[in-house]
Image (tube, grey):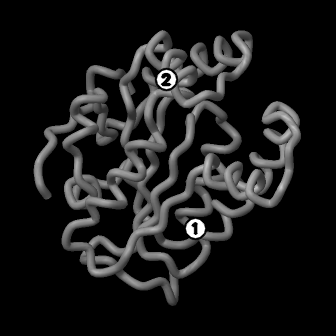
Amino acid sequence: MSQAGVRRAVAAPGGAGVPQPGPLGPVLVVIAGLPGSGKTTLLRRLLERAGNLPASPTGLDAEEVAARLRESGLTVPYRVLRPVVHVAHRWRVLRVLAGPAPVVLLSDPWTSGPWRRAVLAAGRCAGRSVRLVVLDVPAETAVAGQRVRGRTIPARRMRRHTARWTRGLTELPADAVLVSRSQADRLTLDAVVGGAPAA
């Protein structure tokens, strides 16, 4: 699917046994973007702007896992902690997707093919529709964002993310929503969940 077929957001107000948040049923909202692009900020903002959803949404972000590990007293550098964070985060994602939460928000670089397939398969098994929100942020801006948050990733790893991200932009489903940072500032969860499901 060409990126030309992907719609840009218009920021407006807005399985068995799984509770229904509305007529569309349980939903997974994926917030995709390069490391440092602002995924965590957008996730937190959408959680704060849950609007008229009948049930509280559940947010899943690797930074929350990292923070909990640090609070437990671990003082090792993040580069050592990162593999533990990733495993714990991904296990939690799959567990929550299979559970009763009606609306799940996941922030993820979305650059790993096997992980994307695992997440989407878990969502389908739980009867969830998918909304894909793509933070359209240049790599240079994302790197600057990493510096601001005080945690950067190695340049080689960032180049790999960027290369996969660039390829992925040409394969987005037509109903994915691209947002700039300024558009993301005005986006609401009602507007996202009310959109058409991504393939």
Q: Is residue 12 left or right of residue 61?
A: left
Q: Is residue 127 left or right of residue 158?
A: left
The kind of residue tagged 1 is: Leu
Q: From what the image shows, is residue 101 above or below residue 168? A: below
Q: Which residue is mark 1?
A: 97
Residue 160 or 6: which is nearer the viewer?
160
Q: Residue at x 49, y 61 (%)?
A: 59
Q: CA distance from mark 1 to mark 2?
A: 29 Å
Image location (x, y in percent) of residue 96: 60, 70
Other residues around mark 1 within 10 Å, as few (<14) / some (14–19) / many (≥20) = many
Residue 4 or 146: which is nearer the viewer?
146
Image location (x, y in percent) of residue 130: 41, 56
Q: Residue at x 40, y 62 (%)?
A: 129
Q: Residue at x 71, y 49 (%)?
A: 66
Label 2 residue SS: helix
Q: Which residue is mark 2?
A: 145
Q: Residue at x 19, y 73 (%)?
A: 52
Q: From what the image shows, is residue 122 above or below residue 37? A: below
State which mark lies toward you, 1 or 2.
2
Residue 136 or 182: which is nearer the viewer?
182
Other residues around mark 2 within 10 Å, as few (<14) / some (14–19) / many (≥20) = some
The kind of residue tagged 2 is: Gly
Among all residues in the image, which is located at the extreme bottom? Answer: 17
